[in-house]
Image: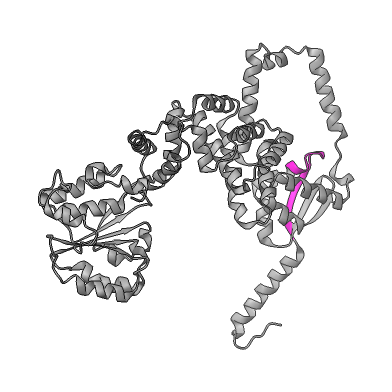
């Protein structure tokens, strides 16, 4: 007999074996026991969560002569008849390949015929969102008022594509993603039954790779089952999943967090030599940084991650050496880089740029990066205090002579500052624009480019081209940025005005408006 894939071999046949969908099972079982069946059901959820399995179990259960706790008994004549693939009372339709209006019209004609050996004729329409608009319209009336012997079960992964007129005629059940723990428990039982030795961390890694889908996880488990005759290890699973060299990646992330740019670029070259694509490398790096964030923030983090003890200890050491904001910023940088890869022909450059940017928080003006730098400084200060170095006390204990010397130096430094009237207008404007760009005030920088500047004694006047620009410049935040950008000069008074051209244009517009009001728009032509 041909080999049967694990996800097919272990497909649940009763509601008791349907994993992670207790909220749906309870409702369906109560409907079967209470004989309160609907005529149309909609099962929606991501792939591999049990929609088709639940539909098949439900189809058998409502026809079973002796249901056990709402599930089909599997022993009665009806259950045996439905186990035959040639049975025509439970019909599975693939809407992806039968999505036209002609197929639905044919279905409408066939629903009139009663079941052969069952109480209900059940139509399971998989991927129903693939039906065309005309096909949905043809299905509407039949779906709303089908014959008493017909039950429709629609299954879809993209419920948003189904018309509201169809949704309103169905009982909707949303299938949830399955927890990693439950998937790992199922894989462990299967491996025990198959006689496959395994590490607990290896099974957890397979379950985690399934991302909530039992079918995806069992497909990986199927590959792992044939990977080798010995014990399945965590590293074996990483090889199967195609993950990059984990030790090298961990060292790479450590170098990023330690701001060792040279080591970061050297490691990227080594990773590229492994033959992995930059997209895979960025995903792997993102996964490690996410795990570090879990280690940093959760008290029982390894219950979530399921890592081998040696690897977890390494992650714990790296996480303890940084702070949450730094990890968040690194995660954000690499996530943005992953999106950028879709639109570039130079993926390595994108990866290297993201890595260097993440490794140099001192040049990153992002909010999280700034908070991270502050937290790092606070940590360093606390470390100095623990070593007995009291920075504040040292400042207080400075003798009067040194304090006087410091004050004198400050006054001397102030005396070296230039007055704005001693600098050429072009040079003054150039300094202002340069400093605005440095602080990241792009909008203000753009406006200042178009203004004229005048210096009269201790007064600096910015002359805007438009009244709207003048209003923006007069805002307190804008004035503060301008004054701070010119703080290398002696204190000055800042004034904002609008150009005479703007005033003249306003006067012309007002005069033209008065003339039009007197003589009428249809007579007056302004040139």
- Residue 113 drawn in magenta: no
Which is more toward the observer, 416 or 171? 171
Return the x and y of residue 290 as percentages of the image width and height: 53, 37
Return the x and y of residue 325 as percentages of the image width and height: 57, 34
* Picture quadrant where residue 223 is located: top left
Which is more toward the observer, 164 or 81? 81
| Residue at the farthest bottom position | 523
Which image quarter holds the C terminus?
A: bottom right
Above or below — where is 141 with respect to 171?
Answer: below
Above or below — where is 101 with respect to 262?
Answer: below
Is the image coloured rainbow, by chain, by secondary structure, or in one colour?
one colour
Which is more toward the observer, 350 or 433? 350
Which is more toward the observer, 145 or 110? 110
Return the x and y of residue 523 as percentages of the image width and height: 62, 88
Above or below — where is 178 with respect to 204?
Answer: below
**Residue at point 67% right, 51% down?**
474
**Residue at point 85% right, 36% down?**
417
| Residue at the farthest front position | 1
Q: Is residue 212 visible?
A: no
* Drawn side of residue 484 relative to residue 288, left or right: right
**Residue at point 86% right, 32% down?**
415
**Residue at point 83% right, 27% down?**
411
Q: Is residue 167 visible?
A: yes
Return the x and y of residue 363 as percentages of the image width and height: 70, 39
Where does the magenta region start and end? 484-498
């Amino acid at each position: 007999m041909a080999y049967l894939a694990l996800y097919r071999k272990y497909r649940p046949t009763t509601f008791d074996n349907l994993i992670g969908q207790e909220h749906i099972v309870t409702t369906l079982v109560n409907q079967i026991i209470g004989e309160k069946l609907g005529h149309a059901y909609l099962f929606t959820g991501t792939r591999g969560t049990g929609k088709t399995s639940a539909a098949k179990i439900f189809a058998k259960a409502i026809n079973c002569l002796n249901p056990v706790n709402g599930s089909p008994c599997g022993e009665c004549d009806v259950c045996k008849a439905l186990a035959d693939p040639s049975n025509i009372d439970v019909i599975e339709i693939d809407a992806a390949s039968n999505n036209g209006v002609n197929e639905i019209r044919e279905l409408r004609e066939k629903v009139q015929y009663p079941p052969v050996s069952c109480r209900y004729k059940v139509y399971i329409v998989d991927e129903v969102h693939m039906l065309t608009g005309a096909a949905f319209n043809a299905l509407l009336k039949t779906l709303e008022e089908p014959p008493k012997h017909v039950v429709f079960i629609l299954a879809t992964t993209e419920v948003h594509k189904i018309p509201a007129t169809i949704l309103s005629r169905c009982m909707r059940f949303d299938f949830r993603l399955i927890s990693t723990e439950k998937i790992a428990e199922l894989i462990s039982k299967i491996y025990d039954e198959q006689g496959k030795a395994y590490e607990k961390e290896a099974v957890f890694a397979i379950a985690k790779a399934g991302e909530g889908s039992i079918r995806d996880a069992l497909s990986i488990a199927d590959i792992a089952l044939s990977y080798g005759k010995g014990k399945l290890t965590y590293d074996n699973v990483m090889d199967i999943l195609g993950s990059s060299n984990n030790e090298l990646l961990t060292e790479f992330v450590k170098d990023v967090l330690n701001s060792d740019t040279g080591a970061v670029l050297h490691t990227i070259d080594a990773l590229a030599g492994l033959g992995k694509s930059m997209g895979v490398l960025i995903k792997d790096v993102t996964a490690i940084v996410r795990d570090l964030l879990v280690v940093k923030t959760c008290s029982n983090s390894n219950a979530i991650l399921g890592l081998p003890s040696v690897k977890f200890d390494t992650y714990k050491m790296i996480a303890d050496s940084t702070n949450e904001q730094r990890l968040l910023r690194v995660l954000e940088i690499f996530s943005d880089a992953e999106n950028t890869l879709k639109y570039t022909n130079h993926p390595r450059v994108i990866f290297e740029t993201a890595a260097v940017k993440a490794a140099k928080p001192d040049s990153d003006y992002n909010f999280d990066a700034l908070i991270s730098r502050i937290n790092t400084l606070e940590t360093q200060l606390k470390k100095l205090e623990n070593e007995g170095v009291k920075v504040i006390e040292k400042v207080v204990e400075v003798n009067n002579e040194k304090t006087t010397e410091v004050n004198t130096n400050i006054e001397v430094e102030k005396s070296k500052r230039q007055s704005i009237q001693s600098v050429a207008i072009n040079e003054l404007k150039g300094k202002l624009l340069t400093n605005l760009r440095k602080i990241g005030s792009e909008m203000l920088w753009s406006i200042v480019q178009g203004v004229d500047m005048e210096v009269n004694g201790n007064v600096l006047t910015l002359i805007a081209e438009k009244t709207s620009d003048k209003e923006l410049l007069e805002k307190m935040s804008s004035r503060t940025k301008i004054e701070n950008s010119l703080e290398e000069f002696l204190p000055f008074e800042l004034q904002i005005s609008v150009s005479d051209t703007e005033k003249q244009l306003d006067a012309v517009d007002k005069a033209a408006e008065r003339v039009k009001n007197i003589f009428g728009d249809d007579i007056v032509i302004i040139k």
